Image (cartoon, helix red, strand yellow):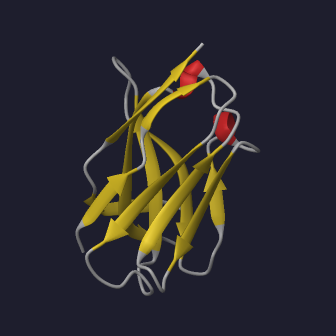
């Protein structure tokens, strides 16, 4: 499946954005989907993930502020980002893959990035 991320932009600190990731095919059977981000000079990090069963996992830095969801009918993954901080500035990527029994994710497909810039 091919993924296309959108929804990034420039927002002031404290504001909100919703990222979308449209898939070229059905996501109903995709085991896990996720959002990652990469800030300049830093490694890419997992921000949030959601399984086919609806279980979610968040990075500590975004817990309580970001919400990941998937709409299988629309073949779309979302990331609602509230109370944004300058530290959230990064390129955000969506992905699809699998998760094993131990909770380890294996990402197979990636969307292109969408830039999120939070001004102070």
Question: Is residue 36 found left or right of 50 in the rendered image?
Answer: left
Relative depth, front residue between 53 and 90: 90
For residue 107, what is the image quadrant? Answer: bottom left
Which residue does the image show at 24% across and 74% down from the upper left?
1
For residue 3, what is the image quadrant? Answer: bottom left
Question: Is residue 53 found left or right of 23 in the rendered image?
Answer: right
Q: Is residue 104 visible?
A: yes
Which residue does the image show at 42% across and 29% down from the upper left?
90
Determine whether 89 is above or below 44 in the image: above
Q: Quadrant of the C terminus?
A: top right
Relative depth, front residue between 42 and 76: 76
Determine whether 53 is above or below 101 in the image: below
Question: Is residue 15 found left or right of 42 in the rendered image?
Answer: right
Q: Position of residue 11 (x, y in %)?
A: 54, 28
For residue 119, what is the image quadrant? Answer: top right
Q: Is residue 102 visible?
A: no
Which residue does the image show at 34% across and 17% down from the upper left?
41
Q: Position of residue 51 (x, y in %)?
A: 55, 72
């Amino acid at each position: 499946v091919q993924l296309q991320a959108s929804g990034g932009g420039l927002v002031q600190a404290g504001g909100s954005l919703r990222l979308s990731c449209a898939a070229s095919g059905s996501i109903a059977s995709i085991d896990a989907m996720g959002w990652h981000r990469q800030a300049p000079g830093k490694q890419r990090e997992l921000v949030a993930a959601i399984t086919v069963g609806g279980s979610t996992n968040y990075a500590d830095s975004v817990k309580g502020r970001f919400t990941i969801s998937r709409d299988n009918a629309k073949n779309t993954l979302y990331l609602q980002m509230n109370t944004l901080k300058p530290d959230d500035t990064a390129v955000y990527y969506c992905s699809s893959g699998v998760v094993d029994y131990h909770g380890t994710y294996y990402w197979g497909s990636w969307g292109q990035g969408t830039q999120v810039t939070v001004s102070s």
